[in-house]
Amino acid sequence: MNKTLWLLILVLGIFLTACSSSSGSTAGENDEQFTFKLGHVGPADAEHPWEKYARTFAEEVERESDGRIKIETYPASQLGADREMTEALQQGTLEMGLISTIAMGNFVPELQIWDLPYIFPTDNAKVDEILDGSIGDKMKDAVSQKQMIALSFWENDWRAMSNSKGPIESVEDLKGVKIRVVENKPSLHWFERVGAIPTPMAFSEVYTALQQRTIDAQDNGTLLTFGSKFYEVQPYFTFTNHIYAPLAVMISESIWNKIPDDLKTILEETAERLASEQRQYSRDTAKQLGEEMKAAGVEVTELSDEAIKSFQESAEETYDALAPELGQDLINEMLQYRD
């Protein structure tokens, strides 16, 4: 009698264990939950294109994953400057980030192709073709060799220039201007060639440096110039549009390798799905903020066609100088898209 009872209990236990395992309803690999920090240097403004879409991304990923992934956003350099966050991504001490590709050139040299002045076409549709096409895929492959994964390329902005000395209407107006730049070869080479004084500096230090006149200028577009209130201490702004800066949706490779394939798919597909929407919102917002800077008293300059041509020509020697290192073939591939 007792033996029969114990046998029934044993069989029932095995049956329940098998059912539990096959249904996936108990804690296991497919039910493991993840909480990721996502940092960026953009303003802590819920309507800014970076923070707005970082939050949208977090919400959609949490919904699509049934709560298995929660993403917390940390704007305004709370987790460090771009360089510090990129290093943290490589080391696996930061899970995710929105990092401007111009800030990653020293980590992923191939990305410096995109930092060459005037290498991008002015047509946004062609820009999107580059980011979403074969060149974008090549850049993702390059990133993946550096302990990081680029899920998608969103938009930072077209880089422009604000300064405290006077209107910039020609290449000659850059001579002697001490300008904060991201520390990468294309920026340093081009600005030095045109007679400016390029000064690398962490983004978090820029406002104070502009305010104290340690530097004369900085080269971000309207999104960061307005969002970071640089216009308060910079009375002149010029739409030079000298560099197009993609914004990479990044995840640490060590974190990526720990999550199941279905969650990887959700992260990647959500980042890619939001890309075109984020870019369009970014472009619309950039135009709006340009008008708001004018209303705030900033003297805003748009370059003439002749001036733009002169700026483009000024960049050609930088292409030639860096081609042996960055690759002439990729430079040529980019130039095929240019107007």
Image (cartoon, grey):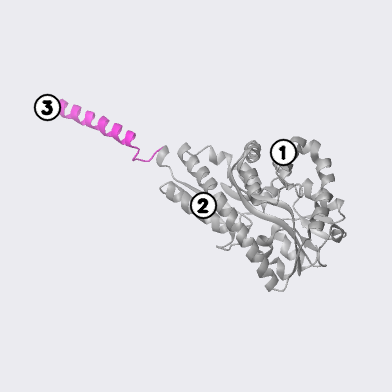
Point 68% across, 49% down: residue? 83
Discs 3/1, front: 1
Which residue carries the number 1 mark? 333
Sequence-earlier tag: 2 or 3: 3
Task: Decide: few, some or many residues near mark 2? Use Cα within 10 Å; few <14, some 14-19, many ≥20.
Answer: many
Discs 2/3, front: 2
| Disc 2/disc 1 C-alpha distance (Å) | 31 Å
Contact check, label 2 and label 3, Cβ < 8 Å:
no
Q: Which residues are magenta?
A: 1-28
Disc ID at residue 1: 3
> Which quarter of the figure is the N terminus placed in?
top left
Q: Quadrant of residue 112?
A: top right
Q: Mark 3: which amino acid?
A: Met
- Looking at the picture, how far across and down is residue 332, in whole percent? 75, 38
Is residue 290 part of the magenta span, yes or no? no
Q: Mark 2: which amino acid?
A: Phe
Task: Decide: few, some or many residues near mark 1? Use Cα within 10 Å; few <14, some 14-19, many ≥20.
Answer: few
